[in-house]
Image (cartoon, rainbow, N blue to C red):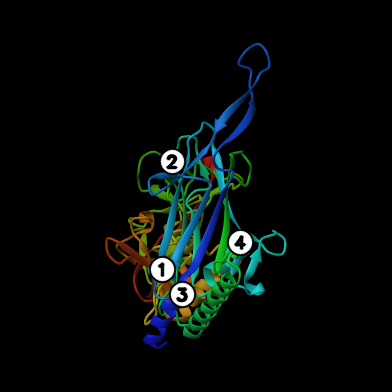
Amino acid sequence: MNPRYKRYLRINLISLFFIVLSFISVTLAWFAYSGLSTVSTDVGVKAWYIELEKNGESISNNIVISLSEIYPGMETLNEVVKIKNMGDTDAQIKYSIVSARILDDPNDNYVVDNETITSDYVEDILAHEYPFHLNISLSKNYVLSKGEESIFEVSVSWPLDSGHDALDSKWGSDAYKFQLSEEEKRMQDENYQVRPPIQIVISVIAEQYIDKPDSSDVRYNLGDMILFDVVDNKKCTELSDTCLATYVIDVDNKLGDEVVTLMPTPKKTYLNGIYNNYDTLFSTITNDWTVEKRPLTVEDLLRIVSKDVMNSVLVRENLSDAIIGNLKYQDRIQTEIERATNEGGYYVFEYEKFEFLSSNVCYWTKTEYNNELAFALKNIDQNQTKIYGELKNTNCNVVPVILANKNNL
């Protein structure tokens, strides 16, 4: 795209983007529980409420995020809301998209009914199918009573050089026409309420935490360290050749899950070699292990690092970095991997946020990049780590993945 045209596009996209976040059922609730505090059969109540906090200040249920400018090459914008449980009952948190309207085209108007249109579908569309990208992340699906907070985050980005200049141009033109149309309607009718070009309604709901199979298992959070003995097939207390420091790599382990997926720390060398010897190296490492195990895949890594909707990005030559974003819907993760390999890209994430994945020396996944390369991981520096295509004749470590039965933990 001509640089002058890009500057023109930026001017025409002022006041383009509005997001409405509706936080529902999050301030105050009462849950009944049965108890026998005296001889009589009294029914008591537990107080439970959630406090939302933005920039250190408490906020109300309804949050309106107004973005005055959005344009190709814009600085990625984000809103962070801390969700705290100030009551005495544990709570589970979930969010869903209620509706999304993109300009005035019926084909870009989504109302979630959970039958023909689901929240997951709309979230995927907003994350990947428009020139701009809106991504949502919830750090934990629960907040314990007076425990650690959960972080709800929304990011909006628009890469300058996405490789789709024609689409960027069309979008800019359509947005400008919509804005002019709305202003004309207001000139004709002073009572007319000008609509934002884009409006997304998101519902964040807090409910009483109940022990159900689909509830998050609060014992096994992403990145939690567990000492596990791979020969005795049980939790252990002191590091040794068989008692390994492992980390939970399930993004959201559920109470109904019988196993926990653990990754031994990659900072320890197990065996290293070329990619074509992966199976032999894996078998040698795990020969005496009695625990169920499997190879590490690039899908394992991407599910984890994509939870950071600000700093985990796809890097490609001559194109702008693009936030990885939501990969939860159907086969989106495979589409994302194909995008990286087709465009010669690699992924970068912040060392500090996922330190349990980081290593100063490369280690393999079992996933091929192409005929000459396979996906591997290693630190770029003390701040960033990359998931990239490494030459198959390079010597890298092999790190098996453990499927630990919860009964042994």
Label 4: which residue? Answer: 120
Quadrant of the image occupied by residue 186:
bottom right
First in sequence, mark 2 or 4: give its number.
4
Structural distance between the alpha carbons of marks 2 and 3: 39 Å
Q: Amino acid at mark 3?
A: Leu
SS of the residue under disc 4: helix
Given this view, does label 3 or label 1 mark the residue nearer the observer?
A: 3
First in sequence, mark 3 or 4: give its number.
3
Q: Is residue 39 visible?
A: yes
* Residue 277, x across and y down, in percent: 42, 70
First in sequence, mark 4 or 1: give its number.
4
> Which numbered dot is residue 300?
none
* Residue 6, x across and y down, in percent: 40, 82
Q: Amino acid at mark 1?
A: Val
* Residue 249, x across and y down, in percent: 47, 54
Q: Dot 1, crowdedness within 10 Å: few (<14), some or many (≥20)?
A: many
